[in-house]
Amino acid sequence: MASADDVFINCPFDPDFTELFRALVFCIYACQFRPRSAFELEDCGQLRLEKLYGLIEQCRYGIHDLSRTELDAVSKLPRFNMPLELGLFLGAKRYGNATQKRKRALILDVEKRRYQKFISDLAGMDIKEHGSDALKALRQTRDWLANVSRRELPSANRIATLFERFRTDLDTICADLDFDPKTIPYVDFERLLVNWLVEAKAA
């Protein structure tokens, strides 16, 4: 069963993408949805692909970032995880039951039409560009969630302002708890973010 509150995040998880990923997670929580990603997948007794099937099945919404196309420094090959997971999501929407057919996807890239050079079968889809700018990705995400859910959400300006405050506070929060803000485990980052949002709304 796909949850109307769950948003699947399909994006690179390397350090260069950390700020953009955190902006997506922050925006989703600030809009009172729940982000879901491969960072949840810690069960060594289950195949990764099976875990992804489960995550995708549970999420009505999916954000798919295709911006990481550079060749790996060692293998000299690109990474295909993101296009694969987008394909799984679109396949579930196309061939799944009535609940799965209600899936909605946001596709992001560095440039709006760059995808035509490496995944031309997406021609005709309204791909959004973020230019590797975390705040621009945050704004794209907020406006898309408002459109597909038809819920009343905080403005993109409001969420961007909150995110900037959170980024400023994160170093202090992590220092108080003896975490390195650059390498804090996702489960801890998520907990700190949610607690920070609760306090920000109460202030």
Image (tube, grey):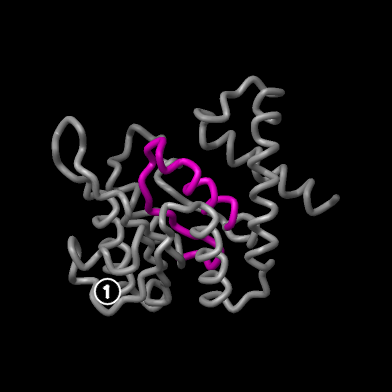
The residue lying toward the viewer, choosing from 94 and 171, is 171
The residue lying toward the viewer, choosing from 54 and 166, is 166
Question: What residue appears at the point 25 percent right and 57 percent down from the top-left corner?
Answer: 83
Q: Quadrant of residue 12?
A: top left
Note whether 26 is above or below 125 in the view shown: above
Label 1 amino acid? Tyr
Image x and y of residue 42, in percent: 41, 35
Q: How many marks?
A: 1
SS for dot 1 = helix
Note whether 115 is above or below 181 in the view shown: below
Q: Residue furthest top?
A: 178
Image x and y of residue 198, in percent: 75, 49
Question: What residue appears at the point 59 percent right and 56 percent down from the top-left corner?
Answer: 27
State the residue position of label 1: 95
Q: Quadrant of residue 70?
A: top left
Q: Which residues are magenta?
A: 1-27
